[in-house]
Amino acid sequence: MSETLFQKEVKVRRITTLSSQAARGLGDPARLRILEVLAHKPMTAEEIAKALAGSGLKKATTTVRHHLDRLKRAGLIETARMVEVRGAVMKYYSATMKAYGCNAPADLDTKAARTISDTSVKMAKVLNGIYGDKRFAAIAEKEGKCKEFLAAEIMNAALARAIEVTRP
């Protein structure tokens, strides 16, 4: 007979919504760094390779192009524009997902407990509004059992728009 020596309730502290395709696209640390670089402005593969090298991650342009292809297939970047230069086409890429590469302090939940509490009350109201929205119900009905995922994706997209218009 086995005895339980230790047990505690573990609460979810972070939510990251990724499709399996997007998760595969992020399967290499260089790709996450590329997303960080592209969050600031559209860049070519050559410019990205230089930016990576400047941050200590030296990659050949051909390797960067491979990573760009993987990110594009995962829906994490798009071709922002194409420019003809001396008979060749130069592609500029932009991120469709914001990736943050810094680490929050380990005690953030403690230090920001009041802010987290206040914000979660406001977000619960927003989430209930999403769940009650007829348009959301129609989407969720089609997608089956992904209701929480879809609501989180809607909130993520809304947060991304809010960040864009309120940049410090």
Image: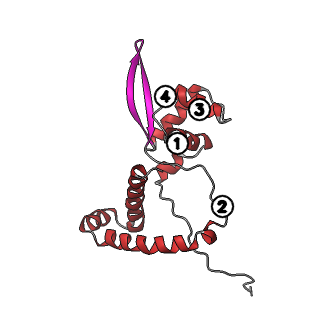
Examine the residues drawn in magenta and state their main secondary structure: strand
How far from the left and from the top, in percent, is residue 150? 38, 62
> Which residue position is annotated with label 2?
105
Which quadrant does the N terminus fall into? bottom right
How far from the left and from the top, in percent, is residue 100? 55, 50
Give the mark toward the camera: 4 or 2.
2
Residue at the (55%, 65%) spot, across then down = 14
Task: Calculate the distance from the C-alpha at mark 4 to the C-alpha at mark 2.
Answer: 34 Å
Which kind of residue does numbered mark 1 sit on? Answer: Leu
Could you say whether the residue bearing mark 3 is in a helix, strand or loop?
helix
Which kind of residue does numbered mark 2 sit on? Answer: Pro
Which kind of residue does numbered mark 4 sit on? Answer: Thr
> Which residue position is annotated with label 4?
44
Q: Which residues are magenta?
A: 77-95
Could you say whether the residue bearing mark 1 is in a helix, strand or loop?
helix
Q: Is residue 81 magenta?
A: yes
Mark 1 in CB contact with mark 2 (< 8 angstroms): no
How far from the left and from the top, in percent, is residue 63? 58, 30
Which kind of residue does numbered mark 3 sit on? Answer: Ala
Mark 3 in CB contact with mark 1 (< 8 angstroms): no
Please say if 12 is above or below 162. Answer: below
Q: Earlier in the sequence, mark 4 or mark 2?
A: 4
Judged left or right of residue 132, residue 85 is right
Q: Nearer the viewer, residue 119 or 155?
A: 119
Please say if 92 is above or below 136. Answer: above
Please say if 100 is above or below 68. Answer: below
Judged left or right of residue 20, residue 81 is left
> Which residue position is annotated with label 3?
51
Task: Calculate the distance from the C-alpha at mark 4 to the C-alpha at mark 1.
Answer: 13 Å
> Which residue position is annotated with label 1?
35
Q: Earlier in the sequence, mark 2 or mark 3?
A: 3
